[in-house]
Amino acid sequence: MTPNQITLVRKTWGKVAPIADTAAQIFYEKLFEIDPGAKRLFAKTDMKRQRGMLLDALGLVVQNAERPECLTPVLEELARRHVRYGVEDHHYTSVGIALIATLEQELGSAFTDEARAAWMAAYALVSGTMQHAAGDAVGAAA
């Protein structure tokens, strides 16, 4: 991510923070619209707790965007857990679409083309790291 993208992600995240739980609710609604099959992954999940974990994870990414090496071990462990939950490669695409759609809805005109590109870069970093670790985990289990 470029320094400008990091600044944009942090600036827009600052606008989401006051409405974070609402944004997280909207995110999961959008995710389940985009990928109805993903709902089964959350069948026994306390969604309030899940929303909090999502927000914590996003906050960690925002906080450490200029230091991806700090994020890597956390994201790799998260990916290994997600494999155990049944997350598959295609779910990462659905999550990315839901994230961008949620930010677009909640930020309105503040979600500029540049902000969209910045968040897409941030999500590419996250999903790429996680998918690589998930692939390793699946390969090791085979």
Image: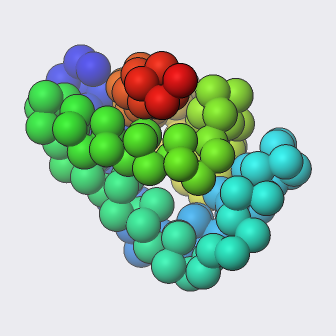
Residue 61 x/y as whole percent: 29, 44
Residue at left 31%, top 44%?
77
Q: Looking at the image, which residue sits at the far front?
A: 142
The colour scheme used here is rainbow
Residue at left 53%, top 24%?
142
Residue 44 can be seen, yes or no: yes
Viewer-proximal residue among 62 and 88: 88
The N terminus lies in which quarter of the figure?
top left
Q: Is residue 108 left or right of residue 82?
A: right
Identify the image quadrant of residue 91: top right
Viewer-proximal residue among 44 and 58: 44
- Against 80, residue 93 (above or below) is above
Identify the image quadrant of residue 101: top right
Residue 103 can be seen, yes or no: no
Residue 74 x/y as whole percent: 25, 45
Residue at left 42%, top 24%?
140
- Against 125, residue 103 (above or below) is below
Q: Is residue 2 left or right of residue 23?
A: left
Residue 88 x/y as whole percent: 65, 34
Residue at left 69%, top 75%?
44
Q: How many dots with numbers?
A: 0
Residue 27 x/y as whole percent: 65, 57
